[in-house]
Amino acid sequence: MDSTTNRRYAVPEWHHEKIQAERDCQEPKDHMLRVVRSMPEQEGPDFSSIDWEAELALFGGIEFPAYYHQPFHSVPGGYLSRTAAAGDRCAMEAIYQDAHPRRSLGLRDELGSLVPADARTVVDLGCGTGDAAAAIARHLPEARVTALDASPFMLIAARHQNAGIANLRFEQGFAEATHFGDASVDAVTITLVFHECPDETKREILAEGLRILRPGGTLVLSDTGQEDLHGYRGFYEPYKEQWLVFDPPAFLRDAGFGESVAKDVAPPLWSFVARKPA
């Protein structure tokens, strides 16, 4: 599925070694197997019309940092692969099939409600295939929502599966180094990104969020439980040990945000809402 003539996205051999080691670990893999078996039952987007080679050619030649070159979720190539992008919606639907009547898409809607109703410029950092950003754009039709991701594969999928939303725009870029001006946006959202990042990158992303937010602007940070990555053994997660001890309020405070407030609107995901000091 991932055949491509573009050498930029060639899969290194060590990816396969990491994936095999994860498969061989002795910890239970029940959750992983349940997701894999449930994915074919989920309703996913139809990507049969996409010319992946042609669309990849439209993207620039940005350099990906070392932390990004990982076989996330035991997918060779990680986020720089067609497999990850094309299977993202079905994987998310399978993981959260019992969490909400509308599965992962329902959770996205609940999280979208955390963005202030008066926000007019919203940036979603690390948008993946765009379902969270799409939920925000539908929730706030008067806002301009920009969804940013580094992976061209994820953005290709995002633009196809969330087409036709007039106030939503997808752009390529890194969450820790955006093109937005200082104090230029009303709200920043970061959903299911931090567990895929080393701590240094988490800090860089929060610093960037603080920089681009207007004084009094809102940051919404949402992610999975700290023990979840160990509960899904079989899916390779390079930063799972750091995630076990991640302290969201402390990271937000150290980054310069005001007091963060926990919001339990989309369990099993947690959320913290914080503001940039006025």
Image (spheres, grey):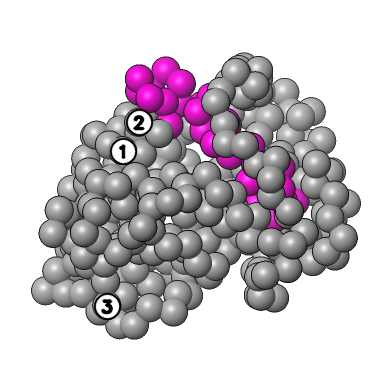
* Numbered circle sitting on residue 109: 1
Circle nearer the N terminus (3, 1) = 1
Instruction: Give the residue number, with chain letter if any, for mark 2.
Output: 106
Tell me the amino acid under the disc marked 1: Asp
Q: Residues within 10 Å of mark 1 (few under 14, many from 20)?
A: many
Task: State the quadrant of the N terminus.
Answer: top right
Q: In the rendered image, is residue 59 in sight?
A: yes
Callout 1: SS: helix
> With respect to residue 190, does 72 lie above or below?
above
Q: CA distance from mark 2 to mark 1?
A: 5 Å
Q: Picture coordinates of residue 89 (x, y %)?
A: 54, 36
Magenta-colored span:
77-104
Which residue is more in the foreground, 2 or 242?
2
Q: Quadrant of residue 84?
A: top right
Which residue is more in the foreground, 177 or 249?
177
Contact flag, marks 2 and 1 (Cβ < 8 Å): yes
Q: CA distance from mark 3 to mark 1?
A: 25 Å
> With respect to residue 63, does 192 lie above or below?
above
Does the magenta-highlighted stretch encompass residue 91? yes
